[in-house]
Image (cartoon, rainbow, N blue to C red):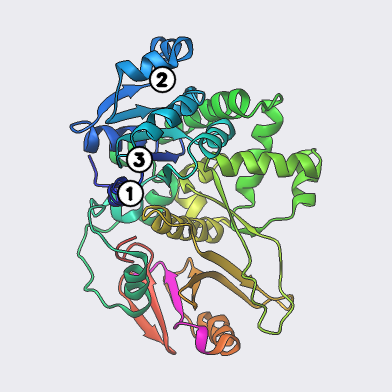
Amino acid sequence: MFPRVLEGAIKKAMKTFPAVLVTGPRQSGKTTLLFERFSKSHHFVSLENPDVRARVLEDPVGFLKANPPPLILDEIQYTPELLHYMKSAIDSNRKPGQWLLSGSQSFALMQGVSQSLSGRIAVLTLLPFSIAESQKRGNKRTEIDEVLQNAFYGKREKKKNKPLSLDDWLLRGAYPEIRVNREVDRQLWIASYVQTYLERDVRQVMNVGDLNSFNRFLRLCAARTGQILNMSDLGRDAGVSVPTVKKWLSILEASYQIYLLPPHFNNFGKRIIKSPKLYFLDTGIATFLLGLHGRDPLMQGPMRGPIFETMVVAEWVKAFCNRGERPELYYWRSKAGLEIDLIIDRNSRLYPIEIKATSTIMPGHTENLSKWMKLAGEIAARGLIIADITEPIETKGVRVVSWDTVQGM
């Protein structure tokens, strides 16, 4: 098993919470992580088995008596009703770390968690591999502050790893099965994933009737990855109302297919854009939905920049989620067009990042950072550019690093 950074957050939560829920998209490695790392100390039960589910529904109290903690309940979203009975069991014995749950997030599951286990459970998110995890560096215990220090100021020596191929990372994405097993056919795997997602999560869990319309909506969202979200335009192109757009976007968010990056609230005396930017959380899914299946159509085409930016934003989302933290990520754009692709708001400091899908850094690439840092003043950290380069460089007081060498992410 490839080490996962989230293991450290799980162990930390187990010291104080009676229960820990690991949620995230399907096939992100939740079952593997809990089984491989914790099945020696906890009894493992999969609720994906129809027979087990039937026992739970018929006699939840008897099921819990037959399966006392320490216990791993895998795929808990199939039996959210069980959470109510778990509350009684937890309240009778508040010993930390006795209950480990996994589940692909659904509205029913999270509603059950908030209603039944509030204050008793830590909720963590496991996304597909980060770049570090794909290189078996997921066991390095770095906190977010250390990640930022290294990225922006280069305090740690760069580890030497086998170089990753940018086009391969963007096309295959980061889901563990397709990333680890090179024999898995990309198009077949992702096509099956999308179809299963539509049939199981969207239709059964979210009660969307017209899958063809939702599938078209999903592809239109992929075409807008890396762009400021305009719900009216999206609804017009999809042929649905704005309220439907909002509902369907919430479905994509809840199932970890997209991430909506909010604008930063500080206007620094400028009028700013207030709509979020839309990003897919896996570039393999996004490129497949866009019909990009080869290196040249991706790397030479108009979507290279947005897909590259999507990948970088997704990596920073993973950096926070893997450490059990809420992403403190924003973008900033003034009405006049001055934009910073990504801002990390941490400890009263703003860390600005520009994302450039280029291998040649030109003087003009630092202009937005320089203008913004002058506006932000003392609360701004130094500027960072993430680009398709091989070695870090310094230019006009801005650090430029490769997309695959920001350590600890």
Q: Quadrant of the C terminus?
A: bottom left
For discs 3 and 2, the disc positioned in front in the rendered view: 3
Task: Classify residue 82 as left or right of residue 143.
Answer: right
Identity of the amino acid at label 3? Pro
Task: Identify the residue position indicated by label 1 in the image.
Answer: 16
Query: Does residue 181 lie above or below 227 as drawn?
Result: above
Number of residue marks: 3
Nearest the eye: 146 or 188: 146
Which residue is the site of mark 3? 18
- Tag 1: amino acid: Thr
Circle 3 SS class: loop
* Contact, mark 2 vs mark 1 (Cβ under 8 Å): no
- Residue 62 visible, this angle: yes
Q: In which quarter of the image is residue 195?
A: top right
Callout 1: 10 Å neighbours few (<14), some, many (20+)? some
Chain part drawn in magenta: 378-389
Residue at 44% x, 60% y is 316
Say whether residue 292 is left or right of residue 49: right
Q: Can residue 182 be seen in this view?
A: no
